[in-house]
Amino acid sequence: MAIFENSIQWVLNLGSAVFVPLIIFVLGLIVRMPIKRAFMSAITLGVAFTGINMVIGFMADAVSPASEAMALNTGISLPALDLGWTGAASITWSWAYAFAFFAIQIVINIALLALNWTKTLNVDMWNVWGKALTGYIVYFVSGSLPAAFIVASLQVILELKLGDMFQRHIEDLTGIPLVTVTHPMNLSAVFMLPVNKLMDKIPILNKKADTEALRKKIGIFSENSVMGFIIGILLGFAGAYSISGSLNLGIEVATAMALFPTVSKLFMQSLSPLADAMSEFMKKRFKDREVVIGLDWPFLAGRSELWVTLILIVPIFIGYSLILPGNTVLPIAGVLNYSIAVGGLLLTGGNLARMIILGLIYTPLYLYSATYFAPILTDMAKVTGAVDVEEGRLITWSTIEAPELRIFFAEAFNLNWLAIIGAIVFLLMFIWLNKSVTKEKIPSLRYEKESE
């Protein structure tokens, strides 16, 4: 067991930019890609992940200080320290049972593929820690280790089904065939679905409103760099930056916004040859059988609607944290809420107006969830020794992914009847989402038709 854990840890230490391309290379060889093409696809994917992560890091480094300054200017102090996803991941990997979730994900995925109950092959092994985190939360709340593995297994299944249902939307948004997202942040679409359905009844919200549509209406102001520059300046002013500081922040955000589409093209360059090879491989062996590749979300980063939504929600997120009663967390490390942005992008087809409205409505959910999870993550840090936490201090993650799943099912196994009802409602809404997404037209195409 120790040898297995050490081997997995060594691979994980390589980082996702090496780990995932390694899996892609092996997968390419399995589907009979020439070694040269498989190698080039893997290297290009590694470059794409590294490039996107560099730009995301650059964006976060620019925005986070302004967000912190905005919050500190209020003079309000909140007790729970936001460590963001990186802190949560490092703590989770230190849990003794974390590595068992690799086997759970692989076995379930292979079984569902063999039974033809999914068409998604999830190669995003890096984010196995998300299932381990769910397991620990359930274990902490319910005291049951079997319950921890049951709920984590359910999460694996839901991620695969999300990959199935959103694949055609993702291909429409990115132009990359046979690739999908299997990240748990997609689960945000479950609870956002009812509000999105209500917005179907509002004519003005049924017009195409992605950045391409805006470009036709407002010209230069819809360009990625110009939008980034304006948003960056406004964020700087909100953080009480000087004119010079605000202008510099504007340029930094504009730079990131301009680079995202350029770097994201590398994902298409890398994944399209593999998708073609997989398609040919499956056609020869299984009649009418299609298998898609499940990946982490960054290959969606070329969609500027995602970044406009992320940044515009920042002051809203901080504002909510200062006025909501019972909230204990100030969003700093996790201030960019990818769950709302990615879930909203997939659900609405990049309709900016809808994405921002969804952000306004659902942001409080993440603050209250982070408050709920604070004692759990603090305990996990103390148990594993991964992070030193001062006595009387709490740590948390302000934009923790899939909070509904984790809270409802953890409390359900603690025999909380309200949570049991909540878990049932969540699963019913998931079924509703699946039927809605798979039967309806791709949102971006539907809006285009209605706006003509």
Image (spheres, helix red, strand yellow):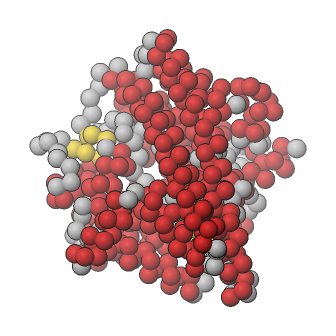
- Position of 325 with respect to 244 (left or right) is left
Q: Residue at x 26, y 40 (%)?
A: 80
Q: How many marks?
A: 0
For this orientation, the residue located farthest to the left is 391
Q: Which residue is drawn at 46% across and 80% down?
A: 108
Q: In the displayed structure, would residue 46 be above or below residue 155?
A: above
Residue 291: quadrant of the picture: bottom right
- Position of 283 with respect to 295 (left or right) is right
Quadrant housing the N terminus: bottom left
The answer to whether any part of residue 184 appears in the image is: no
Q: Which residue is drawn at 39% across and 28% down?
A: 65
Residue 406: quadrant of the picture: bottom left
Query: Residue 60: image x %, image y %?
Result: 45, 36
Query: Residue 363: image x %, image y %?
Result: 47, 42
Query: Residue 9: image x %, image y %?
Result: 30, 65
Q: Which residue is drawn at 36% across and 45% down?
A: 84
For this orientation, the residue located farthest to the top is 243
For this orientation, the residue located farthest to the front is 36
Quadrant housing the C terminus: top right
- Position of 300 with respect to 392 (left or right) is right
The answer to whether any part of residue 228 appears in the image is: yes
Query: Residue 121: image x %, image y %?
Result: 55, 73
Between 366 and 220, the one lying in front of the other is 220
Residue 328: quadrant of the picture: top left
Q: In the displayed structure, would residue 424 be above or below residue 393?
A: below
